[in-house]
Image (cartoon, helix red, strand yellow):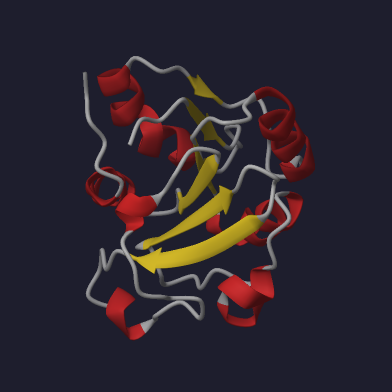
């Protein structure tokens, strides 16, 4: 899979973790991280992605507490994807894949990459069989930029089979 665009939540006075999470991938692929949207602007980010990047694959790294609003902005239903509609504070290994077909219909899945010993105890409600490698174009991947930056990025890279080149 080839990433076309990388987005991270804008730096806040408390954290720049989403940007730090994507930095090694950005350097490896030579793709600039776009971080002009803060946590209060998920709809602006979703509008930009829809308007400017149709047919491309976008990776977004966001603060876990704000991911439900980001999901809503992309037309997904957090309560169908996350327990009680929220990303648990003690889960770091989930990767959300939003995939749009040619007419814009959304399919959404949460994959548990089991980054910490606690992650397997928290399977996401929408966990389904299948391979993450079947992600097609017009995809948005969302991961948590909270605490396990480097490990989470490495798992995400393995999960989507990024080919550097």
Q: Quadrant of the N terminus?
A: top left
Task: Give the left or right position of residue 43, taking residue 78 as reference.
Answer: right
Q: Quadrant of the C terminus?
A: top left
- In the displayed structure, 33 sits above or below 88; it is above
- In the displayed structure, 54 sits above or below 89; it is above
Q: In the image, residue 144 lies at what x, y percent?
A: 46, 53
Q: In the image, residue 104 lies at what x, y percent?
A: 69, 46
Q: Single out the residue that lies furthest toward the front.
A: 102
Front residue (pair 123, 118): 123
Inspect this view and state whether residue 148 appears.
no
Residue in the picture at 27% in, 43% down? 157
Front residue (pair 88, 159): 159
Say which quarter of the image contains residue 30. top left
Inspect this view and state whether residue 38 appears.
yes
Task: Give the left or right position of residue 76, taking residue 63 as reference.
Answer: right
Residue in the picture at 28% in, 28% down? 24
Front residue (pair 13, 19): 19
Residue in the picture at 55% in, 53% down? 98
Q: In the image, residue 101 lies at what x, y percent?
A: 60, 48
Say which quarter of the image contains residue 54. top right
Residue in the picture at 60% in, 48% down? 100
Q: Single out the residue that lies furthest toward the bottom.
A: 121
Say which quarter of the image contains residue 90. bottom left
């Amino acid at each position: 899979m080839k990433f076309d665009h990388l987005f991270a939540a804008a730096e806040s006075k408390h954290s720049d973790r989403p940007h730090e999470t994507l930095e090694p991938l950005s350097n490896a692929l030579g793709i600039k991280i776009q971080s002009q949207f803060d946590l209060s602007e998920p709809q602006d980010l979703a509008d930009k992605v829809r308007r400017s990047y149709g047919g491309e694959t976008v990776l977004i790294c966001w603060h876990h507490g704000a991911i439900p609003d980001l999901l809503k902005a992309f037309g997904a239903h957090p309560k169908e994807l996350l327990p009680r509609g929220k990303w648990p504070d003690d889960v770091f290994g989930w990767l959300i894949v939003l995939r749009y077909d040619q007419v814009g219909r959304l399919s959404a899945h949460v994959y548990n990459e089991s980054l910490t010993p606690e992650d397997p105890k928290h399977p996401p409600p929408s966990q389904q069989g299948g391979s993450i490698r079947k992600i097609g174009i017009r995809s948005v991947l969302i991961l948590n930029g909270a605490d396990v930056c480097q490990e989470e990025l490495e798992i995400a890279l393995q999960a989507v089979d990024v080919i550097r080149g």
